[in-house]
Amino acid sequence: MDLSLSTRVQGDRTVIDVAGEVDVYTAPKLRETLIELVAQGSYHLVVNMEEVEFLDSTGLGVLVGGLKRVRAHDGSLRLVCSQERILKIFRVTGLAKVFPIHDSVEDAVAATD
């Protein structure tokens, strides 16, 4: 499966809707989107992963890189994910302690830094 990305502004956050597989082949597309958004001045990002079917270590690395980019501007990167198989990856790698993970985009947008 391919990767589809779309961005939208909701409140004071930029939401990136991610669908499909985030792996070694598709992760560069997500990386470019994150880099472009930060370059445009979007420092508070919400990555909606509700439609992600697969996530590998390359995808995790892209998310960590995005987090470092926004933090350099005192920003934030929140994840939206309620799928157990994807959440398990974040727990096993210890990244569940690094990323704020929310059940819905609304919760992530409403959360204060």
Image (tube, rainbow, N blue to C red):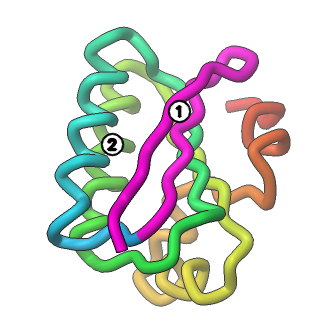
Residue 80's mark? none
Report the span colored magenta. Answer: 1-20
Residue drawn where x is 59% and y is 46% of the image: 78
Who comes first in sequence, dot 1 or dot 2?
Answer: 1
Left or right: 2, with 77 as reference point: left
Amino acid type indicated by mark 1: Leu
Quarter of the picture containing the C terminus is top right
Residue drawn where x is 66% and y is 55% of the image: 80
Q: Is label 2 in a helix, a strand or a loop?
A: helix
Q: Position of residue 6 (x, y in %)?
A: 49, 37
Residue 66's mark? 2
Q: Is label 1 in a helix, a strand or a loop?
A: strand
* Residue 51 sits above or below residue 45 on the image: below
Q: Position of residue 14 (x, y in %)?
A: 56, 25
Quarter of the picture containing the N terminus is bottom left
Q: Position of residue 99 (x, y in %)?
A: 54, 57
Q: Are marks 1 and 2 in contact (CB under 8 Å)?
A: yes
| Viewer-closest of 65 and 35 | 35
Amino acid type indicated by mark 2: Gly
Res 112 → quadrant:
top right
* Residue 28 sits above or below residue 58 on the image: above
Q: Position of residue 3 (x, y in %)?
A: 36, 59
